[in-house]
Image: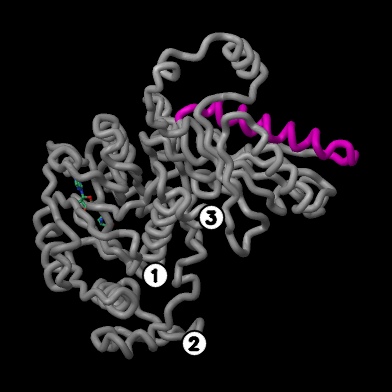
């Protein structure tokens, strides 16, 4: 569960009643745990519980129609919150460590304009959202909930059409979106819904009151729905920074990654939400050159024999360990190495409380490889370019590569190395189109730092 999810400890229903009277009649005692609970098969009780949580913890007054989906609290509610927290991490990626240095550049996290999210969950990262709805009853209910909470200036509900684009607000709107979130209809047919219920995908004590339109997308279930989003996103490109969806089946993750790869969309992220026995996944993809850390883009615990291992996106976080050296030793050599790379800008960022200050590095081109150095030497012996001769001013383009480099104690590498804490350089790709440029830079830095330290005769592991 996400570390910021407040429902890591399940809410006490008896206490919840104090702030939401309407829940009181549904409270029963659970002889097994001697705690209070509700009858999860009672659809009214489920709705009161969801309303109570939304009221107490999010300050929202909700009405959930009996005929429409009510996420059984706390399980699905927790998962949705995990999804929203992952989304928040993606939007804020790199901000925490590198802060204002990055905001002035291409990663500027200007206030998002019209993001889709059911509710901002008291997070300041969503300023306004657009929610899409196909079904008349759900649409009316969503409108009602928005207006009774006086949120019309922040949340827009738009009516979708079954024959239209899923991402149609991107077509009609000139604003750019920071992200989309989606909980797609999971199933392809009523038979699939029945089969899934039989296989006890739904816990025996929970009811699922979803209408057909909520559960079924006849054109391929969730794979079809999210596959269509991928296809549509290709048309809108960077109009939205991150396209995302939740997925209910592991096989759908494999299918959607296949569709992304087929379309050469290599900038994507996968996460997993585990809640009790149930696993769900979410996928995000982008046409921007912003690169996410592996901690957000890859499922961390996944082993090579896992079915999803080959679906993971390529690594954007590279580590190289320097056993036996102190953080101070390696940090000093790293700083010297980075400052010594011709044509690369390097700023040490003061970030209190971390292992060592990160360096923010920007490069316009490859100046470090042997061939780049050879070609620079040849050019230096030629005449200056005519633009420079004539004194023309040029504006600096965005760097081709932005990354951060820092020294950490790497516990992951240390386990492989027999349990001793290892001092490691972590090179984090932040921005750029060219993976080969990033990998070549990381390799160069690792080799240089290694050769500076090698005189001390200790080993190096990684990259
Ligand atoms: C699983 S429900 C999720 C409902 C709600 N967003 C949630 O997370 O509880 C799937 C939703 O997708 C909507 N939907 C189905 N087809 C759609 C389409 N083509 N465009 C937009 N929404 C659609 C359904 O009406 C339903 O509300």
Task: Relative to 170, say whether 19 is above or below.
Answer: below
Q: Which residue is mark 1?
A: 74
The range drawn in magenta is: 433-459
On the rendered structure, is 247 left or right of 380? left
Q: Dot 2, how many residues are within 10 Å of its Cα: few (below 14), some (14-19), or many (20+)?
A: few
Q: Secondary structure at mark 2?
A: loop
- Per the image, is 436 magenta? yes
Q: How many marks?
A: 3
Whether label 2 lies within 8 Å of ligand 1 gets the answer no
Q: Position of residue 260 (x, y in %)?
A: 39, 31
Q: Earlier in the sequence, mark 3 or mark 2?
A: 2
Q: Which residue is mark 2?
A: 34
On the rendered structure, is 288 left or right of 399? left
Q: Depth-wise, is mark 3 or mark 2 nearer the camera?
A: 3
Q: Dot 1, how many residues are within 10 Å of its Cα: few (below 14), some (14-19), or many (20+)?
A: some
Q: Secondary structure at mark 1?
A: loop
Q: Position of residue 300 (x, y in %)?
A: 58, 48
Question: Front-most of 8 and 382?
Answer: 382
Q: Earlier in the sequence, mark 3 or mark 1?
A: 1
Question: Front-most of 158 and 392?
Answer: 392
Whether label 1 lies within 8 Å of ligand 1 gets the answer no
* Inter-mark Cα distance, 1 to 2: 18 Å
Name the residue located 41 percent from the left edge and 48 percent from the top edge.
Answer: 104
**Are the residues flagged by discs 3 and 1 in contact, CB closer than 8 Å?**
no
Quarter placement of the C terminus: top right
Q: Which residue is mark 3?
A: 97
- Per the image, is 362 magenta? no
Please name the predominant secondary structure of the magenta segment in the image. helix
Quick check: can you spot residue 290? yes
Name the residue located 38 percent from the left edge and 88 percent from the top edge.
Answer: 14
Q: Earlier in the sequence, mark 1 or mark 2?
A: 2
């Amino acid at each position: 569960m996400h570390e910021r999810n407040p429902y890591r400890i399940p809410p006490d229903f008896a206490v919840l009643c104090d702030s939401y009277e309407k829940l009181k009649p549904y409270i029963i005692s659970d002889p097994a745990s001697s705690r209070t609970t509700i009858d999860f098969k009672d659809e009214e009780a489920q709705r009161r519980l969801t309303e109570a949580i939304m009221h107490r913890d999010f300050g929202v007054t909700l009405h959930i129609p009996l005929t429409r989906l009510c996420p059984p609290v706390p399980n699905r509610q927790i998962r949705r919150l995990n999804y929203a927290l992952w989304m928040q991490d993606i939007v804020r990626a790199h901000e925490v460590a590198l802060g204002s240095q990055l905001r002035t550049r291409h990663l500027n996290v200007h206030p998002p304009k019209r993001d889709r999210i059911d509710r901002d969950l008291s997070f300041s990262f969503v300023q306004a959202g657009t929610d899409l709805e196909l079904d008349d009853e759900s649409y009316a209910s969503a409108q009602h909930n928005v207006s009774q909470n006086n949120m019309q200036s922040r949340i827009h509900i738009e009516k979708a059409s079954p024959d239209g684009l899923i991402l149609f607000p991107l077509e009609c709107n000139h604003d750019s979106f920071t992200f989309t979130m989606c909980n797609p209809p999971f199933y392809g047919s009523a038979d699939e819904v029945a089969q899934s219920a039989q296989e006890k995908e739904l816990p025996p004590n929970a009811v699922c009151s979803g209408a057909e339109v909520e559960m079924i997308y006849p054109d391929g279930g969730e794979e079809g729905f999210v596959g269509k989003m991928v296809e549509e996103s290709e048309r809108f490109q960077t109009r939205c920074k991150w396209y995302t969806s939740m997925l209910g089946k592991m096989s759908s993750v494999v299918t959607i990654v296949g569709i992304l790869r087929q379309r050469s969309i290599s900038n994507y992220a996968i996460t997993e939400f585990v809640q009790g026995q149930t696993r769900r996944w979410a996928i995000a993809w982008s046409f921007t050159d912003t690169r996410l850390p592996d901690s957000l883009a890859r499922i961390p615990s996944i082993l090579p024999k896992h079915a999803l291992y080959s679906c993971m996106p390529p690594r954007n976080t590279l580590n190289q360990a320097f056993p036996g050296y102190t953080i101070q030793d390696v940090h000093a050599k790293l700083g010297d190495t980075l400052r010594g790379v011709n044509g690369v800008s390097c700023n040490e960022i003061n970030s209190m409380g971390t292992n060592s200050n990160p360096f923010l590095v920007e490069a316009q081109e490859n100046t470090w490889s042997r061939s780049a150095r050879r070609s620079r030497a040849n050019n230096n012996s030629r005449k200056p370019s005519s633009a420079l001769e004539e004194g023309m001013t040029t504006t600096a383009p965005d760097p081709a590569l932005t990354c951060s480099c820092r020294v950490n104690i790497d516990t992951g590498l240390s386990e492989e190395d027999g349990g001793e804490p290892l001092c490691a350089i972590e090179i984090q790709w932040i921005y750029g189109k060219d993976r080969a440029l990033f990998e070549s830079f990381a390799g160069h830095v690792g080799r240089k730092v290694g050769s500076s330290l090698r005189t001390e005769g200790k080993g190096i592991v990684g990259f």
